[in-house]
């Protein structure tokens, strides 16, 4: 080891010994940021790996898949494919009908347990062997004894459940299970199992049995293709494409994985940005720790300079401290992040409460390169945070520095407003840029700029505000000594004050921003629910019927029931407009072309469709994602005729887009008169419960349908909303805790750095308690200031979240609401916490007698 | 007769579910008094649980030794409810096996197809033999009675026709063939021996493919039934030999797991199909046993079959003629070309089938 390095090590070790608590806090802050980022990344990685695996299981080794653009397609497509198979280079083709059913197990554990949705794949075992061998049913030996494996494989009532599904529904081979598809209830026999990824709930049946028992006669969901040797997927798709009806598309299975990933991408990015905010807060703590350490070490560093150490060595001595704390924090953060990820996966599941995926808890996937990346990110943050103090240390004149440190010189340079204004200007420019790859990257960058600008302005603002405050107090003769000391102290050392509260400003700003965004969003959703749920009682045929389950005859009978004042029916179909994008919902329902706003929460006026054109109302997402702008002619895979976009409505339930059309139009175009949803207005005085009882008594077929009153639906929707923001609240809390840590640790360090100041005060007769009170007032003043400034910054960021980030990532807009009471209460709490943190930190550090404190002034 | 197929097809056979489940399939039963009616009975009998058309034979190749071939179509009625209107409903399944026994290769080239009837050209007819699983087919021309077989696999390509020399030969009692001690353990069964074969066969893939213009003699069995073997039955041995004098010999025995004969039957016919001898007095003695490296089964591939007073010696074209049908009808069995001789003099060529030697069939 060279003498340079030995000296460096001594220096870093000495710095560590001098202020262990502060270093630990700084490291902890970095750790929190890195831990959150690591946890979110790992959870998401695990979830995607799980879904990738689940999708792979379901898709098997098919090189290409023919899938429906809208729900399902007629089985004649399969005959067409077989007819052209040889010429197109298709080795084998396997038809699949996929039906989501609701399961009622034989032994109901809880009488009102929520209905379980299960995907049933109807397959032809002979054809699936070539494309999806993993999905071939495994006949249970016990079931096979009663007539051979074939008897079970080809029985008309056999279902094969994945191990996870068997566990979930508490059934074993030989048991029977009741499933509902639409209004059709089928009693099936569990005849064996099907392999799936661990935790994946999946069922397979014979395709003929599934079509019949689950109400999908004549329909297919997809056809898996295996290609002949040497045939290219593109060539096959090009040849086959023109021969197939417009209701299907040909795509490679990878595009479906992309679709799955796109489903939750915006939500994930949002969470990752929040994690980075925590890291950002940590950077300030590293900065203040390194800066104060450098200030304390100034005499030593100056001595080294006098003894011949060059500038590079001095810079390295300071940087090494930041590096060490950041490294320790990063490593601890990655470890804590993995532990957090495990806990999050167990509590929230793979989508972090976002509600995008349902099903089992994914296994944790550890991505080493990414973890290394997070460690490096933490180190980079540490180095960046120590860069300024290192520069200061080099720039300090040795003689002045030898006489003792004043931290104010180090940080005083920051008391300028130029950088803040510059950053704000950059933010304005960024906000005028379009999103990148469907993500609001410029808007996030603008948020970062606003935040940095706000923090950069803190020293300058402190230097302006507190002297003003001080003069105001002086004018009014408010010279209560302790308050006066506190005010003077803060006003005279604005740089140090900025170090204390930068973290508070940053984290509170983001908290306020999120509070404003979530409050606005929640109220917008509540208003929206009022418009979209006008009826008293809503009923839905159980999941996944391939066809709408409520026949016209049943619709007529329902409308004629004595308790029902008015009945409206709707049909929902999933449309696939682009293979790599999540599906779009088509909603065929009652819409009055003269007054569409009665049923749809339109964002602007409705445009009357030109004569002969079919009016189509689209969600905001359709405009952004597919260019379905008002007044445009657009096409949908359900009909050859073009549609006229007659209006845009809000749809908070579907960020990936939905379209609505009048049911009469839908029925005319598709011939599909069935529906799966109903909205019922009840006669005055009839309660939803009474109506429901009468309804199911009159129509036993509806016993399996899922009915909810409008009130229940609203409450349920808001509950789901709150759950999806649970993760957000968690991150905010983490950022605030880090900020308060910062306040406490800053004052703990100050107690040491200001030992001489306190010594003088004690010498003048100020009691220890009064010193603690002074520091508490300082902390309270600074925290109040930080909270106020943070709230203002947060308001600006909230606006960016509402008007840029939300429309760009989720494709919906909302109005801004300011929950002022909540913000004020949080700010007050923060100010009090700041005062207490400061007081506690100083009290433990002022135990030494005044003489010893004074002696330090050599 | 080909009980073999019965046993081979066993996994696919559904017993009508007990307790009279609504819509349960009722299978037609073999009736002793039912006479065969042609051409109707060339076609399929979908009311019965199991049915097969089995063509085996020897082929002469130019500048190459004679080889054996097998083409089989099985039909199986599952227990799937008749009421299901779905086109994909697996009520009727078709299976096909094709094998080529080339002595220079030393083992069979074997391929198979399995499908449900319905979409994809999987069909049978009830009016005449007209079977197809996509590009595999066996079709009888109603006017001429000539069969055309087409097999297109990865390593096999058959395009051959079979011309009958006479009327079909009903087996057993006018086509009622008893297979066990109980009268219901039986099938409807007729054979067409001495079919004249001509056409083209090819084996191998791509550049390695070799093709021959082939000709020879074949044997067709068509048999249908609904009833399983006797519960004591473990397997069976069967032969169908085209005699050089234009006659034929069909013999089978149903074995217990101890190897004892549970039921046996043999019919020796002269040229033109005239019945010369019919007996249940058969003694089947193994002359050489071949151990299969795949299934570990011990097949008596060379045997002496004493029918009445005649001792027929069977010697295989090659020892390894085992078929792995685990992916279709289930299990292993031995289906091979054999030479028949009496007293050291060759009298005919045909096929020997040995089932139930590879242990109890696993599902």
Image (cartoon, rainbow, N blue to C red):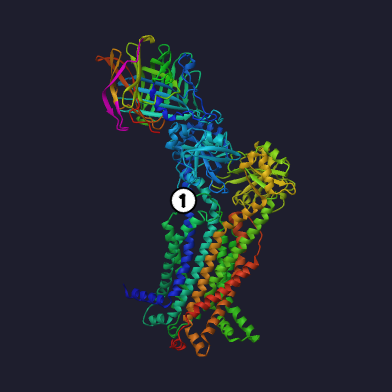
Is A71 situated above or below A605? Answer: above
Q: In screen coordinates, is B347 left or right of A502?
A: left
The quadrant of the rendering that contains the C terminus of chain A is: bottom left
Q: Report if residue B279 lies within the magenta region.
A: yes
Q: Which residues are magenta?
A: B276-299
| Secondary structure of residue under mark 1 | helix
Q: In screen coordinates, is A433 left or right of A691?
A: left
Residue A398 image offset from top left, x and y in percent = 42, 83
Q: Can the viewer see residue A428 in this picture?
A: no
For the stretch drawn in magenta, the main secondary structure is strand
Residue B137 image offset from top left, x and y in percent = 45, 24
Is A41 situated above or below B199? Answer: below
Residue A19 image offset from top left, x and y in percent = 43, 76
Residue A90 image offset from top left, x and y in percent = 47, 34
How many marks the image carries: the answer is 1
Graded by Cα atoms within 10 Å as few (under 14), some (14 to 19) or many (20 or more), the crowding at tag 1 reads: some
Q: Which chain letter matches label 1?
A: A
Quarter of the image where one finds residue A455: bottom right
Quarter of the image where one finds residue A775: bottom right
Q: Disc 1 marks which residue?
A: A49
């Amino acid at each position: 080891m060279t003498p340079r390095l030995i000296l460096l090590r001594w220096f870093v070790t000495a710095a560590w010994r001098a202020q262990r608590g502060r270093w630990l806090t700084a490291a902890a802050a970095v750790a929190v940021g890195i831990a959150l980022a690591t946890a979110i990344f790992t959870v998401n990685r695990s979830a995607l790996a799980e879904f990738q695996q689940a999708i792979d299981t379901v898709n098997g080794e098919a090189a290409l898949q023919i899938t429906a653009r809208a729900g399902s397609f007629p089985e004649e497509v399969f005959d067409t494919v077989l007819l052209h198979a040889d010429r197109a280079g298709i080795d084998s083709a396997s038809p699949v009908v996929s039906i989501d059913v609701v399961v009622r197990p034989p032994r109901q554990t809880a009488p009102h347990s929520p209905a379980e949705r299960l995907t049933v794949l109807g397959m032809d075992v002979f054809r699936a062997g070539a494309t999806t061998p993993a999905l071939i049913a495994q006949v249970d030996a016990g079931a096979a004894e009663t007539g051979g494996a074939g008897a079970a494989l080809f029985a008309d009532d056999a279902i094969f459940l994945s191990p996870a599904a068997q566990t979930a529904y508490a059934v074993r081979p030989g048991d029977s299970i009741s499933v509902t598809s639409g209004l059709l209830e089928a009693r099936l026999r569990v005849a064996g199992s099907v392999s799936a990824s661990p935790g994946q709930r999946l069922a397979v049946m014979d395709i003929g049995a599934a079509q019949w028992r689950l109400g999908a006669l004549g329909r297919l969901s997809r056809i898996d293709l295996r290609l002949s040797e040497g045939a290219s997927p593109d060539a096959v798709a090009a040849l086959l494409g023109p021969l197939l009806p417009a209701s299907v598309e040909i795509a490679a299975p990878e595009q479906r994985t992309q679709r799955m990933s796109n489903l939750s991408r915006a939500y994930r990015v949002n969470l990752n940005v929040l994690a980075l905010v925590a890291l950002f807060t940590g950077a300030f703590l590293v900065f203040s720790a390194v800066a104060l350490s450098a200030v304390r070490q100034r005499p030593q560093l100056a001595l080294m300079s006098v003894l011949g150490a060059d500038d590079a060595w001095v810079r390295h001595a300071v940087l090494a401290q930041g590096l060490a704390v950041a490294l320790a924090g990063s490593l601890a953060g990655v470890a804590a992040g993995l532990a957090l990820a495990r806990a999050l996966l167990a509590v929230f599941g793979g989508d972090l409460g976002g509600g995008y995926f349902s099903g089992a808890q994914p296994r944790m996937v550890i991505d080493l390169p990414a973890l290394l990346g997070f460690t490096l990110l933490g180190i980079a943050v540490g180095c960046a945070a120590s860069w300024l103090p290192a520069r200061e240390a080099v720039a300090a004149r040795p003689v002045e520095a030898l006489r003792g440190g004043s931290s104010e010189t180090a940080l005083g340079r920051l008391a300028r407003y130029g950088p803040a204004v510059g950053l704000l200007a950059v933010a304005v420019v960024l906000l005028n840029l379009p999103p990148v790859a469907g993500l609001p990257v410029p808007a996030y960058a603008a948020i970062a700029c606003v935040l940095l600008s706000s923090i950069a302005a803190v020293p300058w603002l402190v230097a302006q505000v507190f002297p003003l405050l001080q003069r105001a107090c002086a004018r009014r003769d408010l010279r209560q000594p302790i308050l006066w000391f506190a005010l003077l102290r803060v006003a005279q050392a604005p740089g140090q004050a900025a170090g204390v509260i930068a973290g508070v400003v940053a984290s509170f700003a983001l908290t306020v921003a999120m509070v404003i965004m979530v409050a606005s969003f929640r109220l917008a959703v509540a208003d929206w629910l009022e418009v979209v749920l006008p009826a008293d009682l809503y009923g839905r045929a159980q999941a996944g019927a391939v066809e709408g389950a409520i026949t016209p005859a049943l619709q007529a009978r329902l409308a004629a029931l004595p308790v029902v004042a008015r009945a409206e029916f709707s049909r929902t179909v999933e449309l696939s407009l682009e293979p790599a994008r999540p599906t779009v919902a088509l909603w065929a329902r009652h819409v009055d072309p003269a007054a569409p706003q009665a049923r749809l929460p339109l964002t602007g006026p409705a445009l009357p469709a030109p004569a002969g054109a079919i009016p189509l109302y689209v969600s905001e997402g359709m405009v952004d994602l597919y260019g379905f702008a008002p007044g445009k002619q657009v096409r949908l895979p359900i009909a050859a005729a073009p549609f006229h976009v007659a209006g845009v409505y809000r749809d908070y339930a579907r960020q990936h887009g939905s379209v609505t059309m009048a049911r009469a139009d839908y029925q005319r175009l598709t011939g599909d008169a069935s529906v799966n949803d109903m909205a019922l207005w009840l006669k005055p005085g009839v309660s939803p419960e009474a109506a429901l009882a009468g309804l199911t008594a009159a129509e036993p077929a509806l016993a399996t349908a899922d009915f909810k009153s409008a009130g229940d639906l609203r409450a349920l929707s808001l509950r789901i909303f709150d759950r999806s923001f649970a993760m957000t609240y968690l991150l905010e809390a983490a950022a605030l805790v880090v900020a308060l840590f910062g306040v406490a640790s800053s004052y703990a360090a100050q107690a040491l750095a200001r030992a001489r100041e306190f010594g003088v005060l004690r010498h003048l007769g100020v009691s220890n308690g009064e010193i603690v009170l002074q520091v508490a007032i300082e902390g309270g003043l600074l925290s109040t200031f930080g909270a106020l400034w943070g709230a203002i910054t947060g308001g600006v960021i909230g606006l960016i979240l509402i008007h840029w980030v939300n429309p760009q990532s989720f494709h919906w807009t909302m109005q801004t609401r300011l929950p002022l009471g909540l913000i004020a209460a949080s700010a007050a709490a923060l100010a009090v916490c700041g005062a207490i943190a400061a007081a506690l930190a100083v009290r433990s550090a002022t135990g030494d007698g005044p003489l010893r404190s004074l002696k330090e002034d050599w | 007769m080909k009980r073999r197929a019965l046993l081979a097809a066993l996994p696919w056979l559904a017993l009508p579910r007990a307790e009279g489940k609504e819509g349960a399939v009722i299978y037609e039963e073999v009736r002793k008094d039912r006479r065969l009616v042609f051409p109707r009975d060339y076609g399929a009998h979908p009311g019965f649980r199991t049915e097969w058309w089995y063509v085996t034979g020897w082929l002469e190749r130019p500048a190459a030794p004679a080889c054996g071939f097998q083409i089989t179509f099985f039909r199986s009625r599952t227990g799937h409810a008749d009421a299901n209107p779905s086109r994909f409903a697996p009520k009727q399944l078709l299976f096909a096996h094709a094998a080529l026994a080339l002595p220079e290769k030393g083992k069979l080239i074997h391929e198979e197809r399995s499908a449900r009837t319905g979409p994809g050209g999987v069909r049978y007819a009830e009016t005449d033999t007209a079977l197809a699983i996509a590009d595999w087919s066996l079709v009888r021309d109603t006017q001429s009675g000539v069969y055309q077989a087409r097999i297109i696999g990865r390593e096999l390509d058959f395009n051959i026709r079979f011309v009958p020399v006479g009327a079909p030969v009903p087996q057993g009692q006018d086509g009622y063939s008893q297979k066990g001690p109980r009268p219901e353990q039986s099938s409807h069964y007729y054979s067409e021996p001495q079919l004249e074969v001509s056409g083209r066969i090819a084996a191998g893939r791509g550049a390695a493919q070799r093709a021959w213009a082939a000709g020879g003699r074949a044997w067709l069995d068509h048999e249908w039934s609904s009833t399983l073997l006797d519960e004591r039955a473990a397997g069976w041995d069967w032969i169908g030999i085209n005699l050089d004098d234009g006659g034929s010999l069909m013999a089978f025995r149903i074995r217990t797991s101890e190897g004892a004969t549970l039921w046996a039957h043999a019919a020796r016919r002269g040229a033109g199909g005239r019945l010369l001898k019919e007996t249940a007095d058969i003694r089947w003695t193994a002359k050489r046993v071949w151990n299969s490296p795949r299934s570990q089964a011990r097949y008596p591939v060379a045997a002496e079959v004493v029918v009445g007073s005649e001792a027929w010696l069977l010697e295989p074209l090659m020892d390894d003629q085992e078929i792995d049908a685990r992916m279709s009808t289930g299990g292993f069995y031995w289906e091979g070309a054999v030479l028949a001789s009496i007293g050291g003099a060759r009298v005919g060529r045909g096929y020997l089938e040995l089932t139930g030697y590879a242990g109890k069939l696993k599902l």
